[in-house]
Image: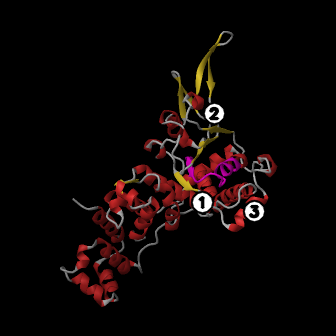
Amino acid sequence: METKEEKALRKRLESLEEGYNEKSFDKDFKDFPEEIKMDVDNPKAEVHNSNKKKEKIIHKVFKKKEKPVKKIESSDRLKDSEINKAAEVLERLKKEIAKAVQGQENVIEGLLLGLLCNSHVLVEGVPGIAKTLAIRALATASGAEVKRIQFTVDMLPTDIIGMTTYTPQKGFEVVKGPVFANFLIADEINRAPPKTQSALMEAMQERQVTIGKKRFHLPSPFFVMATENPLENAGVYPLPEAQVDRFLFKVIATYPNSEEELAIMEQNMTLKKFEDFGLKAVTNPTEILKLQDLVKKVYLDDNIKEYILEIVQKTRTKDFAKGEYISYGCSPRASIGLFIASKARAIMKNRNYVLPEDVKAITYDILRHRLILSYKATIEKITPDMIIKDILSSIKVH
């Protein structure tokens, strides 16, 4: 049975066969480098055991007479005007958010990418570094319906999705919870017990919730932006792995630098109300849905796909320096995340095609919450980011 490479080579030979005869081949072959001629003439040479080398030889031999390949224009191919318009919308959102938030570019970029990918984002950081403020600013600038949940240890699932109630005047009726919004701010999500956290799982994955015996579809777009505090251990519950996996990104919010902190002191939330920043809606839900459709049309080459697969498979094979610290590798949801998020970043960078640098840039946010590390990693203080750095350095970009 033919291998994949042999099948591709045979098809190429068949496509080149028309218009070529033995004499024309011999004529072209005379001008070919001596070392290649020796490889072709020698049946024991390595070139006959490598389809990639054969492909190069065929290309060089026929390059003078090979008919140009007709470029097929796909109806789904993005136009420059579409990309430029999308990049402008994202730039407007960034500028509007910057009115309230100083620094935290990686958090803002992660939130925007999550929105473009029609997925959810988990923001982790110590208290007081504008996690919630950044999310509120994006929600306001998007012009969408926004609701917020402050998670507590006594919160019930019905506090999130809603419930069926009975009143003598109206009878039974469904009272919808705060999950019915375009943007849902889930503040300090790790304070709620697992039973309550799991109430969000159906909403995040299926875009629907079940109240009583009925299912209700959530508005579109639906975007969950959650925050968690990594420091506290009293009254805090670790998020279930199944729920964490449903967040496309886990973004780490860091401390601001001196210049940013000076600006924060001058326009701080203690002396101002959120409304004082004067944020305005610079887009709307309809335009956001169009942007999400554009992301799907961004070109991603097969070599980039192989690069993505190699990154994810490294977490399972563990054949790199720090592989021993991984207990469980990433699921195919990580591959899907890298696939779609790299396309979104390409649009953010005003391109209609993905580069390896796009994949590298989003790998940390995609994988850090999907890697399950061993107890040995905890003892030796090995973090997911250290492991991801090792994985990226061990893979050669083609």
First in residue order: circle 3 vs circle 1 = 1
Q: Secondary structure at mark 3?
A: helix
Q: Is residue 19 left or right of residue 88?
A: left
State whether residue 227 is above or below residue 21: above
Instruction: Report the coloring of the rendering.
Output: secondary structure
Mark 1 sits on what residue?
254
The three-letter amino acid code for the residue at tag 3 is Ala
Mark 3 sits on what residue?
263
State whether residue 83 is above or below residue 181: below
Q: Secondary structure at mark 1?
A: loop
**Was residue 227 drawn as part of the magenta stretch in this picture?**
no
The residues tagged by marks 2 and 1 sit, at their Cα atoms, a distance apart of: 29 Å
First in residue order: circle 2 vs circle 1 = 2
Spot occupied by residue 357 in the image (x, y as percentages of width and height): 52, 67
Q: Secondary structure at mark 2?
A: loop
Instruction: State yes or no: discs 2 and 1 in contact (Cβ < 8 Å).
Output: no
The residues tagged by marks 2 and 3 sit, at their Cα atoms, a distance apart of: 34 Å
In this view, the residue in front, 300 or 235, is: 235
| Circle 3 Cα neighbour tier, 10 Å, few/some/many (<14 / 14–19 / ≥20) | few
Q: Is residue 197 left or right of residue 139?
A: left
Spot occupied by residue 239 in the image (x, y as percentages of width and height): 48, 43
Task: Please give the label number shown on residue 178.
Answer: 2
In this view, the residue in front, 123 or 138, is: 123
Name the quadrant containing residue 156: top right
The three-letter amino acid code for the residue at tag 2 is Pro
State whether residue 167 is above or below residue 159: above
Spot occupied by residue 318 in the image (x, y as percentages of width and height): 33, 61
Give the residue at x 76% y 50%: 270
Q: Is residue 331 left or right of residue 362?
A: left
Range of residues picked out in magenta: 117-137
Q: Looking at the rendering, in which quadrant would you find the N terminus?
A: bottom left
Give the residue at x 34% y 76%: 58
